Image (cartoon, rainbow, N blue to C red):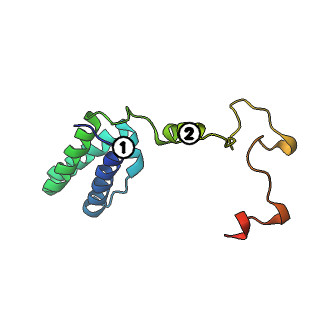
Amino acid sequence: MSLSPSDRVAIAAHLHVLLRRRTGRVTDTEWMAVNEDYARAMVAFARERAAEDNAPELEEWAQRLERAWDAPLDQARQSFMESAMRTVAMRPGEPSARPAPGAAPGPGGKPPGGPPPPAGGSRYVGGLR
């Protein structure tokens, strides 16, 4: 079974809600979906509390999260940011708003690149906010 990164986030979110309701424990859903050590610690905690509180739903969702970490990801564990940066880089004719790594600061200590400041002092594009 192959999972998308959003599948892992969904499982982590469900386990988060169960842990919050049953134990009062607040967890970091996104970190649980991207950090295997943290996810496995939360799986162990959920299993411990499932046994103590006779809560089979905690055990079930702990197993699901554990299986999600054992399954390969569709995108070979590429981070969303890497994928987004590649997509932006492939757009023809659009200058990069981010300076190249190691680029020297521009005038006034600001990084080079990016859009010029708005004319007339307006913070909004085309006067819309």
Q: Residue furthest top?
A: 102
Question: Vertical placement of 34 versus 16: above or below?
Answer: above
Left or right: 125 with respect to 30? Answer: right
Q: Are marks 2 and 1 in contact (CB under 8 Å)?
A: no
Q: Nearer the viewer, residue 83 or 95?
A: 95
The image shows residue 71 at horizontal and vertical percentages of: 26, 35
The image shows residue 110 at horizontal and vertical percentages of: 80, 44
Locate residue 93: give its quadrant: top right
- What label sits on residue 93 in the rendered view? none
Residue assigned mark 2: 85
Indicate the amino acid at tag 1. Pro
Q: Nearer the viewer, residue 18 or 23?
A: 18
Residue under the image location 69 percent in, 33 percent down: 100
Q: Nearer the viewer, residue 48 or 86?
A: 86
At label 2, counting other C-alpha atoms closer than 10 Å, the crowd grade (few under 14, some 14-19, many 20 or more) is few
Identify the secondary structure beneath mark 2. helix
Question: Vertical placement of 125 versus 112: above or below?
Answer: below
Residue assigned mark 1: 5
Identify the secondary structure beneath mark 1. helix
The image shows residue 7 at horizontal and vertical percentages of: 31, 47
Residue under the image location 67 percent in, 43 percent down: 94
